[in-house]
Amino acid sequence: MSEAPSTVPVCYRHPSRETYIRCTRCDRPICPDCMNEAAVGHQCPECVAEGRRSQRPARTAFGGSRAGTAGYVTRTLIGINVAVMALSAILGGATALAGAGGWFGLMGSETPLTRWGEVLGYAPYTLGGDPHGVAAGEWWRLVTAMFLHYGILHLALNMWLLWQLGRYLEIQLGPLRFAGLYLLAGLGGNVAAYLFTPQNQPAAGASTAIFGLFLAMIVVNRRLKRDISQLIPLLVVNLLFTFAVPNVSIAGHLGGLIAGGAVAYVLAYAPRGNRNRIQIVGCAAILLLLLIGAVVRTQMLLA
């Protein structure tokens, strides 16, 4: 006499295990090893994986990735600046860290690296008589200058501000948008220094980008309807510092401030429905304006 077949359901992944629990999503029987707690009941591993694939990643209020909470871009920018300062010291000696510059010598001195990468308009009669500077075709100076510093104090002040401002803005904007903001603000400051500084007066430092972060923080907090009363005095103090201390690039600081504020406005106030496209087009337009300004200045110096 044969036995009647068992009517007890078995796990679809482990046929040897009987179970009365079913996945709340696909209704297949699952054993305790296959159970994943859900808002209601349990789900099987396949339904959990499918749910993760279909789930939209978390974004910031301005469309950026939540990965900015780790601060990787801010840390990377600081690392690049410190590494460049170390290379400058290797090439220029101890005076690169604390040499014959201002602030009791703590601003350091020029090195072969700073002379190669600082913003310089056009100097035809130095370095052996070969023309050099942005107008001589050395366009990289408009970018490299934001990573160069004259001495350890110059570096330390800028990196402290970058750490304070950068971590917050990277969280709010996301890594990619924050990186774009920083680079465009720095470029804006360097282009302004190129436009409005005497052609043989060099300038360098991350402060062009840092000033852009100051205004960007105000714009972002304003958009989020957060208190900005403590940020205004901080910006005013740094502006007073810019105008009061000798050998500070006023054009570079103001240019970075304006460029950073413009980029932040585009990122913060782009309409939600078409946000990504407007942010890209807006930042590209700012970049184009900066390049046009640099080209016009070059033509003026070579005329």
Image: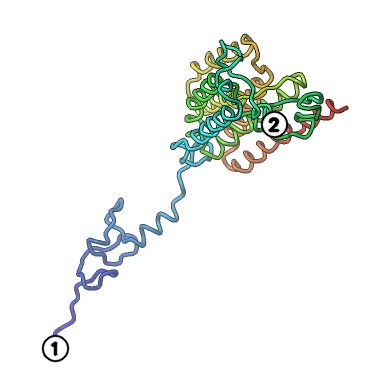
Q: Quadrant of residue 198?
A: top right
Direction top: furthest residue: 244
Relative vertical location of residue 95 with respect to residue 3 in this rendering, above or below: above
Say which residue label 1 marks: 2
Q: Position of residue 89 (x, y in %)?
A: 57, 27
Q: Position of residue 255 (x, y in %)?
A: 67, 23
Q: Quadrant of residue 115?
A: top right
Q: Earlier in the sequence, mark 2 or mark 1?
A: 1
The residue that appears at 31% across and 61% down in the rendered structure is 44
- Side of 109 relative to 125 (left or right): left
Instruction: Kindly identify which numbered label has been placed on residue 141.
Output: 2
Q: Quadrant of the C terminus?
A: top right
CB atoms of marks 2 and 1 within 8 Å = no
- Side of 194 relative to 236 (left or right): right
Q: Position of residue 204 (x, y in %)?
A: 64, 24
Relative vertical location of residue 98 with respect to residue 147 in this rendering, above or below: above
